[in-house]
Image (tube, helix red, strand yellow):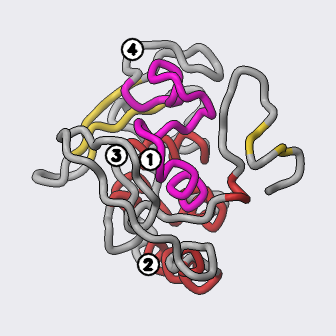
């Protein structure tokens, strides 16, 4: 349990968030007791002998450094596209790519080499993936309600939660890997298809 938590749960009002320091499972080994969307029951895995997921130790300084090295190998590549490339950092989908760019304060079209602190972005990506491995919807705001779970993703034309500007959207990438990108023009200065 982390500091400021009771029994592994955050004491934040009206929020039930699991403390990131108390996670013991990854998504492949987490016990599942509720049905998946397809209607079939999830598989329940036995608890590893040490009480921790055997993959929890996989993410460390070496893996983070390797992910950062791969991402930085093409510094001119847009951050949104680099994050979506599973060869660089597995598990980042379109939701996380857009949300990570927002949290970093850059547009998805900002060259990865121009990011102010790319190592912090990699660490944040890991924290988000790990924190949400048992939650549906990939929340990034700390709110679990679907209408409040994201900063920019899926919010085109709506006001930014931080500054009130209108969230914009455009296509990014080349088919068939083309994705929809979301960004706030005020909170995320930088290159965009708008100019």
Total marks placed: 4
Q: CA distance from mark 1 to mark 4?
A: 19 Å
Examine the image and state in which quarter residue 88 appears.
bottom left
Q: CA distance from mark 3 to mark 4?
A: 18 Å
| Magenta region includes residue 128 | yes
- Between residues 48 and 192, which one lies in front from this camera angle? 48
192 in relation to 84, above or below: above
Residue under label 4, please give it: 157
Q: Magenta residues, as a range?
A: 126-154
Question: In the rendered image, which quarter contains the N terminus?
Answer: bottom right
Are the residues at dot 1 and dot 3 in contact (C-beta closer than 8 Å)? yes
Residue under label 1, please give it: 96
Q: Residues within 10 Å of mark 2 (few under 14, many from 20)?
A: some
The location of residue 22, given as percent across then percent down, is: 70, 58
- What's the residue at 50%, 77% (across, down)? 55
147 in relation to 135, above or below: above
Residue under label 2, please give it: 70
Residue under label 3, please give it: 94
Q: CA distance from mark 2 to mark 3?
A: 19 Å
């Amino acid at each position: 349990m982390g500091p400021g938590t009771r029994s592994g749960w955050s004491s934040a009002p009206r929020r039930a968030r699991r403390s990131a320091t108390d996670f013991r499972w990854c998504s492949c080994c987490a016990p599942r007791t509720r049905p998946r969307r397809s209607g079939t029951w999830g598989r329940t895995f036995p608890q590893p002998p040490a009480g921790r997921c055997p993959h929890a130790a996989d993410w460390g300084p070496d893996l983070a450094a390797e992910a950062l090295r791969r991402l930085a190998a093409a510094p001119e590549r847009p951050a949104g596209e680099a994050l979506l490339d599973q060869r660089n950092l597995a598990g980042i989908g379109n939701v996380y790519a857009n949300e990570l760019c927002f949290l970093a304060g850059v547009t998805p079209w900002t060259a990865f080499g121009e990011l102010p602190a790319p190592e912090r972005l990699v660490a944040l990506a890991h924290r988000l993936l790990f924190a949400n491995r048992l939650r549906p919807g990939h929340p990034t705001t700390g709110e679990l309600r679907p209408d409040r779970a994201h900063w920019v993703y899926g919010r085109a034309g709506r006001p930014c939660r931080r500054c009130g500007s209108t969230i914009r959207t455009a296509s990014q990438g080349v088919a068939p890997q083309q994705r929809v990108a979301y960004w706030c023009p005020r909170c995320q200065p930088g290159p965009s298809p708008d100019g």
